[in-house]
Structure formats: structure tokens, C-alpha cells
């Protein structure tokens, strides 16, 4: 592995070589005889002066290079999984260091913008694929099961009485498969989100959740969600969906409250709170995968998601998307 040297050390080494070279050149030009005692004394004085000069030079170089070392330390602290647009240029009077920091901040912003742009494209592609699958399940597969159910109904009218029980069981299984397909289609992409809007889709999701789990869920909303973009509405719906899933699987709550507020001049805020058992946020009930997925979706639309919880105190989720 190639050995690397610090910039300060390289500058000091060059200064040492230059000073020594100047010393011997001056000595040669002046005809300095080092064999004579007084000449040796003079040479010693010059050498001590040069040593002091080098020490002072090193101290000054260290001080001048300290802003660069501080910038490097700050760059090394950047977490690549977190938004990097909030990088603050250090306060320094060294022009080169300031220019380097400004350039790096611009680079981070371009990287973050590109990550959000590509992330939104992926998000739209995923939702479009979900929409297509949900439509196929609802229109094609469900229609095929409906045809099977009608055929069984026709058979039951002409079948012998001893087969009535078996045909009835088949009809029950087909009905269960149809209900499961409809539930899966709603989870993939609810038609109400496209046809009736965000509020209707969330209310339908909450109603089905309460019916299936027995957990009381309430939605309070303020403002007009139609004013926000389709990508933002999709993210809000998915966060609600994930929050309901976590509540049903992990929290042990009996109540969950949703509050959605749309501010025309400030942005959108979604708050979720339950009275469950809570958990350690750092090591969430699903290993942090669901929470990190919610946070990543929020970042794709320029938002921020925070989760507050501790064992025995319930869970609080806040999603904020600036205007």
C-alpha cells in the first residue's frame, strides 16, 4: 500500500530543503571556512536561527492548515443515508478552504437533487405497476372467479343432492378467494385514491382496519389535500398504510389517531399517535426496515419523517412535507 504524507509535512520538508540549500550556497559564496573555530560558531548560530525559523514556520503552517483539517473532519461526519443539503460552510478567513467548502456543498445539493429525482421516478414506476396489478386482479382474475362461481351455481341446481355439500364448499372457497383478491388489490393501489382523492382513500383504509382488527382508528383533517402533488399524496397514503400495519402487528394498541393538516403556504403535516406499548426506535419491532422505508419515501418528496417512542409510552409519527 502506498504511503501517504500530509500536506503540511510536505510543505515543511520543501522549506527545510530550500533553507539548507540557501545556507550552503551562501556559505560557498562567502568563502565560509568551517574549519576555523569562530567560523564554526557563526555557522552554529546560523543553524540555530534556521531551526527556530523552521519551528515557527511549522507552527504557522499548522495554524493556516487547521481550517482545511476542520473541513475534512466535517466531511467525514456526513451520513450518506441522510439528506446532505444542510451542509454548512465553516466560518474561515482562508479563501481556498471556503471555496472548497462551497463547491462541495453545491456537489452535495446536486447529488441530493438527483437522488430525489431518480427516487421519484422509481416511486412513480412502482405505483404505476401497483395500479396495473390491482387493475388486473380486479378485472381479469376476479372476473374469472366470478365466472367460476356462476358455473358452480348452475351446477348446484342440476347436481344430485349428495353433491350439494361439496359444491357449497367450493362456492365458499371461491368467495373467500374473491375477497382476498379484492383486499390485495386495495393494498396494491386503492381505486379510491385515484377516483375520490386522498381523504376518501385514507378513510376507507381506516374503516377496513378497524373492522378487521377491532382497533379504534380516527382521522382528523384540515385543509384541501387536492392542492398537493400526486407524489405527495401517494407518500402520505403509504405512510398511513405502514403506520396501520405497525399498529396492528406490533403495538398492542386499542386506539390510533391520525391528524392531517394542509397549509397552503407552509406545507403538509401528518401526525399519528397510538396508545400502544411503544418500542425502542433504534431497534424497531421490524428491525427498522418499515420505519426506514417510510423515512425514505418522505425524503423522495422533500419531506421529513420523525418517530418518537419508548417502551410503555405509545408511538408518535410525524410526517412534514414543506410547500
Image (spheres, grey):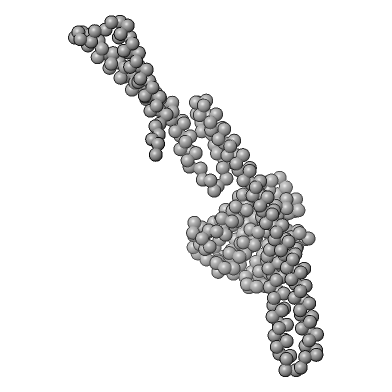
In this rendering, is residue 203 above or below 151? Answer: above
Residue 233 visible here: yes
Q: Quadrant of residue 133?
A: bottom right
The residue at the point 54 percent across, 37 percent down is 88
Residue 292 image position (x, y, % from top left): 56, 55
x, y percentage for residue 209?
66, 69
Where is residue 16? Give x, y as percent: 35, 20
Front-lying residue, 182 or 90: 182
Quarter of the rendering containing residue 294? bottom right
Q: Nearer the viewer, residue 221 or 122?
A: 122
Q: Is residue 107 left or right of residue 68?
A: right
Viewed as shown, does residue 190 lie left or right of 18?
A: right
Does 257 sit left or right of 6 as displayed? right
- The quadrant of the image that shows the N terminus is top left
Which residue appears farthest toward the front when viewing the image?
1
For residue 228, above or below residue 184 = above
For image coordinates 76% across by 69% down, the residue present is: 140
Q: Is residue 189 visible?
A: no
Q: Where 110 sits versus 54, above or below?
A: below
Q: Position of residue 20 (x, y in %)?
A: 33, 17
Residue furthest top in the image: 30
Amino acid at each position: 500500500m502506498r504511503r501517504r504524507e500530509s500536506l503540511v509535512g510536505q510543505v515543511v520538508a520543501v522549506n527545510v530543503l530550500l533553507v539548507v540549500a540557501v545556507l550552503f550556497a551562501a556559505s560557498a559564496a562567502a568563502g565560509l571556512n568551517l574549519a576555523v573555530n569562530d567560523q564554526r560558531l557563526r555557522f552554529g548560530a546560523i543553524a540555530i536561527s534556521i531551526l527556530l525559523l523552521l519551528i515557527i514556520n511549522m507552527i504557522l503552517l499548522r495554524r493556516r492548515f487547521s481550517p482545511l483539517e476542520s473541513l475534512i473532519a466535517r466531511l467525514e461526519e456526513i451520513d450518506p443515508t441522510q439528506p446532505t443539503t444542510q451542509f454548512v460552510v465553516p466560518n474561515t478567513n482562508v479563501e481556498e478552504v471556503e471555496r472548497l467548502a462551497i463547491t462541495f456543498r453545491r456537489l452535495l445539493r446536486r447529488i441530493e437533487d438527483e437522488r430525489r429525482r431518480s427516487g421519484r421516478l422509481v416511486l412513480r414506476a412502482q405505483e404505476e405497476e401497483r395500479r396495473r396489478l390491482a387493475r388486473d386482479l380486479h378485472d381479469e382474475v376476479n372476473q374469472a372467479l366470478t365466472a367460476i362461481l356462476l358455473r358452480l351455481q348452475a351446477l348446484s341446481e342440476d347436481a344430485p343432492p349428495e353433491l350439494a355439500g361439496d359444491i357449497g364448499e367450493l362456492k365458499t372457497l371461491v368467495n373467500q378467494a374473491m375477497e382476498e383478491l379484492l383486499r390485495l388489490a386495495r393494498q396494491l393501489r386503492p381505486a379510491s385514491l385515484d377516483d375520490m382523492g386522498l381523504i376518501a382513500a385514507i378513510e376507507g383504509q381506516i374503516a377496513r382496519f378497524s373492522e378487521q382488527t377491532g382497533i379504534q382508528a380516527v382521522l382528523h383533517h384540515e385543509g384541501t389535500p387536492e392542492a398537493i402533488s400526486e407524489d405527495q399524496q401517494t407518500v402520505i397514503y403509504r405512510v398511513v398504510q405502514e403506520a396501520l400495519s405497525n399498529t396492528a402487528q406490533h403495538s398492542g394498541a386499542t386506539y390510533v389517531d391520525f391528524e392531517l393538516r394542509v397549509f397552503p403556504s407552509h406545507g403538509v403535516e401528518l401526525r399519528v399517535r397510538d396508545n400502544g406499548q411503544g418500542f425502542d426506535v433504534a431497534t424497531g419491532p421490524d428491525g427498522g426496515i418499515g420505519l426506514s422505508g417510510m423515512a425514505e419515501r418522505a425524503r423522495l418528496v422533500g419531506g421529513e419523517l420523525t418517530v418518537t417512542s419508548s417502551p410503555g409510552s405509545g408511538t408518535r409519527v410525524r410526517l412534514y412535507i414543506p410547500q
